[in-house]
Amino acid sequence: MILVTGGAGFIGSNFVLDWLTQSGEPVVNLDKLTYAGNLENLASLKGDARHVFVQGDIGDQTLVAGLLEKHKPRAVLHFAAESHVDRSIHGPDAFIQTNVVGTFQLLEAVRAYWASLEEPEKSAFRFLHVSTDEVYGSLGKEDPPFAETNRYEPNSPYSASKAASDHLVRAYHHTYGLPVLTTNCSNNYGPYHFPEKLIPLIIVNALAGKPLPVYGDGQQIRDWLYVGDHCSAIRRVLEAGRLGETYNVGGWNEQANLDVVKIVCGILDELQPRADGKRYAEQITFVKDRPGHDRRYAIDARKLERELGWKPAETFETGIRKTVKWYLANGDWVRNVQSGAYREWISRNYG
Ligand code: NAD
Ligand code: DAU
């Protein structure tokens, strides 16, 4: 059995669904169900005894210790976090609480559990920490992509909180010998992506006839990876990653935001044209830039390929088409996540 934190969020739920399809090994899924956690993502697992869902906070050491004692997982995969950069600018507290203090408390509970294990379970145990490329800061136009050896230079409260959690994970390996692995991944996209993030926001706004907000000049660059490829990378690192190492995960797919928005608009024009015959790109609206906005991210994923043979399976062309189709086919999911809390966020950030 494995224990996943944050398995009702975007990447965590994709991971749990993929995991149970690929391996069948049971999963305990600990998630607080913040605004970003959604059990509907896991609806297909209803009645599946291999999935045990527990609503709770990673910072609740008594709860986590009890779960570890009861289920005796062979690994903990840590996805739970506050994940949205814009929200971290409006209110950093929750980011420090969950990403820094919560990760610390989780590590403490895991360390005590791991110390209590006998061999061979003790040597086989893994703590896999899911992190981000944003810890490396921002690249200039001509800079080489981020390698694992790049200096940490986080620029937002979100990335600073993730950087702090990475450092804690590293320290628990160095000081206590906890068998840890860390992945630093670029921007994901795909099914169940909460529509506060660029790609799903553009799809849902386009279909609703609303403005498509592009920050600043839209020339900021991100390296997009289909979420299923992130999940396969995590599975591979868990299986064969070297203890204490970090692995960058990316799609070799740098795109300017404005181009991404235009690509999404083009696919929508083809699959669900506007009733008035106009193009969705006409809805593009340039809005005030994000404060401290990182200009460019790009990942050098050669270590993961060289050491563990991982490569992404999707290209951006195949992945983005799948994603747009998923949103077109899952209007109910979109409507259900557009709660009062969602509307309040949209008016705060864009209003
Ligand atoms: P998300 O915001 O969609 O989901 C986060 C999940 O964590 C939610 O289900 C939420 O309820 C849960 N959670 C939040 N605080 C919690 C707490 N205190 N205790 C228990 N559960 C809690 O995030 P995501 O996009 O799926 O990201 C998952 C992880 O991957 C994060 O650690 C993020 O930093 C990292 N990451 C994300 C991306 C990306 O592009 N989305 C890229 C690289 C790395
Ligand atoms: O790089 C990995 C990171 O990718 C993860 O660690 C984060 O959890 C994840 O949220 C994502 O961060 P970004 O800030 O890059 O993602 P977001 O979708 O918020 O924005 C992508 C780009 O699009 C960014 O340059 C900001 C821009 N943007 C975003 C929104 C929401 C816009 O131009 N308009 C928008 O309305």
Image: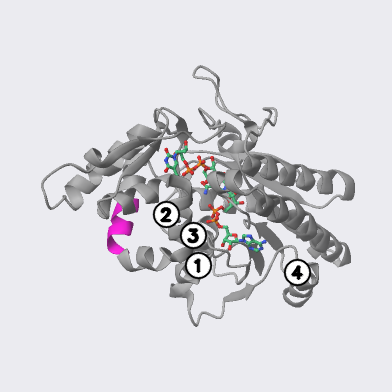
Badge 4 or badge 3: first in the primary sequence: 3
Residue 120 seen in this snapshot: no
Q: Which mark is residue 195?
A: 2
Could you classify mark 4 by the number of other residues whose Cα lies within 10 Å: few (under 14), some (14-19), or many (20 or more)?
many
Against 63, residue 128 (above or below) is: above
Residue situated in front as seen by the camera: 88 or 258: 88
Residue situated in front as seen by the camera: 242 or 193: 193
Q: At label 3, which amino acid type do we have? A: Asn
C-alpha separation, residue under disc 3 versus residue under disc 1: 12 Å
Q: Which residues are magenta?
A: 323-330
Q: Position of residue 208 (x, y in %)?
A: 27, 55
**Residue at the disc numbered 3:** 14
**Residue at the disc numbered 4:** 64
Badge 3 or badge 1: first in the primary sequence: 3
Q: At label 1, which amino acid type do we have? A: Asn
Badge 2 or badge 4: first in the primary sequence: 4
**Residue at the disc numbered 1:** 38
Proximity of marks 4 and 3: CB atoms separated by less than 8 Å:
no
Badge 1 or badge 2: first in the primary sequence: 1
